[in-house]
Amino acid sequence: MKDKLDIMFELREQFMSSLGDKMPLITPSYPLDLSDKKSQQYIRDVALKGVEEMFEALQHLKNWKPHRNTQNTELDRDAFIEEIVDAFNYFFSLIILSGFNAEDLFEAYIKKDKIIHDRLNTGY
């Protein structure tokens, strides 16, 4: 049985494949050669689109200013998570375009998780 991360990667790859079929002139084949200038520019553009989506998610948070005395508890949770999903889609694309997969991401995550816990425990 596939885990949720594998399914998310599969869905993103299916979308990227369909996009490539419909718009071959704007969508490069992958994995990209990360030493190539045009590939790096494309990767950077995809990453920035993911960051833009995160900023769109943050626009839904209205109660974050520490200097504000009034409370604005209004939050459209569905719109907030939708923007986060949009960002994840770009970040998944970034990983796939770079030639990595769900297992690579998981292994890198576990490795980094150990590093940040070690830092926390050693007073980094």
Image (cartoon, rainbow, N blue to C red):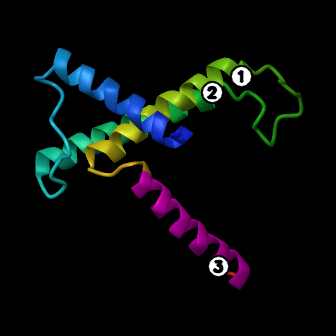
Specify the farthest residue to the bottom.
Answer: 122
What residue is disc 1 on? Answer: 77
Within 10 Å of disc 3 (Cα), the crowding (few <14, some 14-19, many 20+) is few
Within 10 Å of disc 1 (Cα), the crowding (few <14, some 14-19, many 20+) is few
Label 1 and label 2: CA atoms lie apart by: 6 Å
Q: Is residue 34 left or right of residue 86?
A: left
Q: Is residue 50 above or below residue 106?
A: above
Q: Main secondary structure of the magenta part?
A: helix
Assign a secondary structure to mark 2: helix
Residue 115 on the magenta segment: yes
Q: Is residue 99 above or below residue 17?
A: below
Residue 96 on the magenta segment: no
Q: In which quarter of the view is residue 64 placed?
A: top right
Tell me the number on the disc at residue 118: 3
Assign a secondary structure to mark 1: helix
**Residue visible at 19% across and 15% down in the picture:** 22
Q: What quarter of the picture does the C terminus occupy? A: bottom right
**Residue visible at 84% across and 24% down in the picture:** 73
Pointer 1 with pointer 2, Cβ within 8 A:
yes
- Which mark sits nearer the N-terminus, 2 or 3? 2
Label 2 and label 3: CA atoms lie apart by: 31 Å
Q: Amino acid at mark 1?
A: Arg
Q: Position of residue 38 (x, y in %)?
A: 12, 44
Q: Amino acid at mark 2?
A: Ile
What residue is disc 2 on? Answer: 81
| Residue span colored magenta | 103-122
Specify the farthest residue to the top.
Answer: 22
Q: Is residue 52 visible?
A: no
Q: In the depicted view, which residue is nearer to us: 79 or 60?
A: 79
**Residue visible at 27% across and 43% down in the picture:** 97
Label 1 and label 3: CA atoms lie apart by: 34 Å
Q: Position of residue 120 (x, y in %)?
A: 70, 75
